[in-house]
Image (spheres, helix red, strand yellow):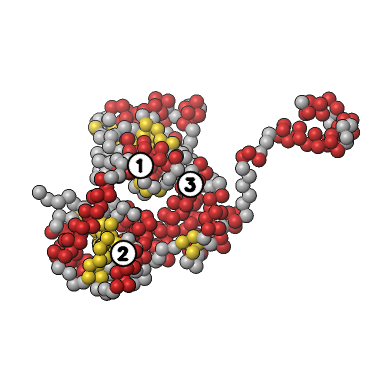
Amino acid sequence: MALRKENILLVDDDINILELLQRHLQAMEYHTYKAISVKEAVAILVDTRIDLLITDIQMPEVDGLQLLKYTEEHYPDMHKLVVTGYPSVDGALKVIKSGATDYLTKPFTKDELKHSVQKALSHTHKSKIIKPKTEGVQNNLYADMVGASEGFHKVINIVERVKDNKATILVKGESGTGKELVARAIHYSGKFSHAPFITVNCGAIPENLQEAELFGYLKGAFTGADENRNGFFQAAEGGTLFLDEIGNASLAVQTKMLRALQEKEISKVGSRKIEKVDIRIIAATNANLLEDIKNKKFREDLYYRLTVVEIEVPPLRDRKSDIPLLVEKFLRKYGIEYKDRLLGISADALRILNNYNWPGNIRELENIMQRAIIMSDGTVAVKDLPEHLKYQINFPEKDFVSLKEMEKEYAKKVLLHTKGNKTKAAEILQIDRKTLREKLK
């Protein structure tokens, strides 16, 4: 019986060593990924579940020790095996302290490699057995999303429940909260991940072209239709169609969408032929569709068809505990992309980011982190942040009172100043005594 195909990431700047490792491991029925630099390795780690990292130490730019430290911090359950041609006692101690399971010296035999890999993976299996089945939900990383807040875990819990079925889903939330990331997590975490994932921004398609773009058309159906063409519904066959900004779909298109959801049938523009479709629809909106229904801009029956499952993505201001994790993610992503190394952030800069209210949500945070990383000298500092963040003043909600309450308090102060003389107080406030009495009630 063949071994289960574990995912093993191989990192070495020597192509020959990479090829040798890959041949040996594939012969042992393992699935391998290759990277010739730490930058490439981090890019693979972000998007792929890796069971074992096998890395060289001596590499240009960012070395293997930094990669080991990085994976120990971000992927503590993933075991690490070091393969190097520069053995030393001090080097071995550094490697083990950095979280490596074993230390293999070049040149090595196939049997030595096999023994080291099996030893590392046996540790991995033991650690997995004692973990709860909710591990994927409790982790701070899910697909390409990170978070530790209650709001984040609520979203992930729903994703876990819907990822393996084709129930229609409506993802709601403010602009920039990551609604498309949620849709991608649903698709790529489930059993339909190998089928197409098609994204359509309904707000970016002119209203007169929406029907043709979504459902396809026949040659001659309208001016400019010089060939038969499939639409996005046909392109997503067997997979997921993500309809972003669904509130911008025209009423004519909404009618056809309703039929597609109810009957699993569509027809191209200019055709009477009915085509069956097998897709999952995930729609998203930052608009109030219930208000649009009242204003006759959105079909009520379509709304209830879309909301078989609803996912509310909270704004970033309501999930402040996720900001350090998101900052860490962007430091990793753009530090490697722009600076070819892993960057840090000062405590003062992180405190400013934590205190900001983030009206643009995660998209705004990502844009600011990109700019800060480009401007930084190695560690993102306060000087690298935009001016409007540095000098912000955030008043907690408890410090705000109603205008009526403010007037009452001010009237009391004036009355105190006049030693209880209401006539004089009313003159200062430029109101009559009756109005003053009302404000003091």
Real-space Cα separation, disc 1 to disc 2, in angstroms? 30 Å
Query: Contact (CB < 8 A) between labels 1 and 3?
Result: no
The image quadrant that residue 89 belongs to is bottom left
- Disc with the residue nearer the chain's start (1 vs 3): 1
- Amino acid type indicated by mark 2: Ile
Question: Considering the numbered disc 1 on the image, is that residue within a helix, a strand or a loop?
Answer: helix
Mark 2 vs mark 3, foreground winner is 2
The image quadrant that residue 247 belongs to is top left
Q: Which residue is mark 3?
A: 321
Packing grade of label 3 (10 A; few <14, some 14-19, many >=20) is: some
- Amino acid type indicated by mark 3: Ser
Question: Considering the numbered disc 2 on the image, is that residue within a helix, a strand or a loop?
Answer: helix
Question: Considering the numbered disc 3 on the image, is that residue within a helix, a strand or a loop?
Answer: helix
Query: Contact (CB < 8 A) between labels 2 and 3?
Result: no
The residue under the point 85% across, 27% down is: 433
Real-space Cα separation, disc 2 to disc 3, in angstroms? 32 Å
Locate residue 54 relative to residue 405 in the image: left or right: left
The location of residue 263, given as percent across then percent down, is: 28, 27
Foreground of the two, 367 or 164: 164
Residue 252, placed above or below residue 13: above
The location of residue 3, given as percent across then percent down, is: 14, 51
Q: Which residue is mark 1?
A: 137
Locate residue 122 relative to residue 157 in the image: left or right: left
Residue 62, placed above or below residue 403: below
